Image: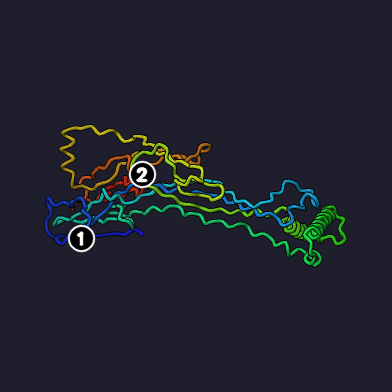
């Protein structure tokens, strides 16, 4: 939720010729009249979509070739993880090194200051909007499979021999296939009345066959899980292990050598001009030190990859690679109605307008 703070001077009726709104560095723990705000750092949220496959052998896997001519059936269970996709977004977090306080002098009109729920400056003298990251998707559980016992007759369930039961189940599977072929060819004793009924009957036969085949071929339970990683780098990253993925254990910490590494690189594209020392500019800047602080972000190239694949890559505005500038306090004096909105993820000016327009 965005919070709005409207501060009124106690001396609105008195003349204000040179009175100004003062913005000062905030000292944590100090009590200062006015509005404390933060400029943001740019943080990165990474969402890893990983697929988990769990294989369980069928109880009759040893008879799959004998009765159904199915070869290469795994005899042992296993778990396999793989990365399906990686997505990233940037967002703003308060920069504790860039905390300021709008402190009111007497006989001034205080601005309407819009802050995020974390105290990041969003707007002055107008409505600002808090940026929201997309929701993290919900995990997807394995699809429910039919229970083979629901399709086994009494003879199958009562035999005391696995070999005999496997033979009876295989015979039932062949009967199901013959019934399906008869329906498709129009040769069944009880043909359906229409296409919808035919489809229903074929679907039921397929469900029965799939259920019984599980006893030979086993089951593959596939689920999808989402993992979130956040980081707020202060400098460029050449090639850092972001996390690791193990085929058996899934996503593991970056120091867990059981998994293969996935890397992140963060390159400063140096889009902000290099500061040039000029005495006139420095004198002018000192006079503006009581203005409203904002960020001029740089730009970063972010890439997430492993030894074989680049999962995602993009260029993003990045507060840490930019500069901090000041809006003159003259813009917010009594006779001024300047409206400003800021990007929450970078602290940059989104829009600035004269309220008189």
Is residue 160 or residue 187 the one in the foreground?
A: 160
Counting from the top left corner in percent of width and height, residue 178 is at 84, 55
- Whether residue 91 is visible: yes
Q: Earlier in the sequence, mark 1 or mark 2?
A: 1
Q: Quadrant of residue 278?
A: top left
Of residues 257 and 253, the one drawn nearer to the viewer in this rendering: 257
Q: Image quadrant for the N terminus?
A: bottom left
Crowd class of label 2 (few under 14; some 14 to 19; many from 20; radius 10 Å)? few
Q: Secondary structure at mark 2?
A: loop
Compute the Cα span from label 1 to label 2.
Answer: 39 Å
Q: Which residue is mark 1?
A: 8
Determine whether, in the image, residue 297 is placed left or right of residue 80: left
Question: Residue at label 2?
Answer: 233
Q: Secondary structure at mark 1?
A: loop
Please name the colour scheme applied to the rendered image: rainbow
Is residue 337 rendered to the left or right of residue 130? left
Say if residue 356 shows up in the picture.
no
Image location (x, y in percent) of residue 326: 23, 44
User: At x 83% / y 57%, what residue is drawn?
Assistant: 171
Numbered label tally: 2
Task: Report the residue at 77% width, 64% height from top.
Answer: 152
- The answer to whether the residues at label 1 and label 2 have Cβ atoms under 8 Å apart is no
* Residue 92: x %, y % from top left: 35, 49
Residue at x 88% of width, y 60% of height = 189
Q: What is the number of the mark on residue 268? A: none
Q: Position of residue 105 (x, y in %)?
A: 15, 55
In this rendering, the label closer to the viewer, 1 or 2: 2
């Amino acid at each position: 939720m965005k919070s709005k703070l409207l501060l009124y001077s106690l001396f609105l009726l008195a003349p204000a010729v040179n009175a100004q709104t003062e913005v000062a560095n905030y000292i944590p723990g100090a009590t200062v009249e006015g509005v404390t705000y933060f400029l943001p750092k740019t943080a990165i949220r990474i969402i890893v979509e990983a697929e988990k496959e769990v294989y369980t052998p069928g109880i009759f896997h040893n008879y799959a070739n004998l009765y159904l001519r199915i070869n290469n059936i795994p005899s042992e269970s296993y778990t396999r993880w793989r990365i399906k996709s990686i997505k990233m977004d940037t967002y703003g977090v308060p920069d504790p090194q860039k905390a300021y306080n709008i402190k009111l002098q007497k006989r001034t009109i205080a601005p309407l200051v819009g802050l995020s729920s974390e105290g990041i400056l969003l707007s002055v003298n107008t409505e600002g909007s808090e940026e929201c990251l997309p929701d993290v998707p919900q995990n997807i559980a394995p699809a429910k499979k039919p229970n083979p016992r629901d399709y086994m007759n009494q003879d199958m369930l009562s035999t005391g021999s696995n070999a005999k039961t496997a033979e009876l189940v295989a015979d039932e599977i062949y009967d199901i296939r013959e019934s399906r072929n008869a329906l498709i060819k129009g040769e069944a004793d009880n043909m359906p009345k229409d296409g919808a009924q035919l489809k229903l009957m074929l679907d039921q036969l397929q469900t029965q066959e799939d259920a019984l085949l599980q006893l030979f071929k086993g089951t593959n339970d596939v689920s999808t899980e989402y993992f979130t990683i956040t980081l707020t780098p202060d400098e460029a990253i050449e090639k850092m292990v972001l996390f690791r993925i193990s085929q058996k254990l899934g996503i593991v910490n970056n120091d867990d050598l059981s998994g293969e590494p996935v890397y992140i690189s963060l390159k400063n594209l140096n889009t902000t001009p290099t500061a040039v020392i000029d005495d006139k500019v420095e004198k002018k800047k000192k006079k503006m030190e009581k203005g409203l602080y904002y960020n001029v972000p740089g730009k970063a190239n972010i890439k997430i990859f492993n030894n074989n694949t680049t999962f995602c890559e993009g260029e993003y505005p990045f507060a840490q690679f930019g500069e901090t500038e000041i809006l003159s306090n003259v813009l917010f004096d009594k006779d001024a109605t300047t409206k400003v909105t800021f990007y929450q993820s970078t602290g940059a000016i989104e829009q600035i307008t004269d309220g008189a327009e």
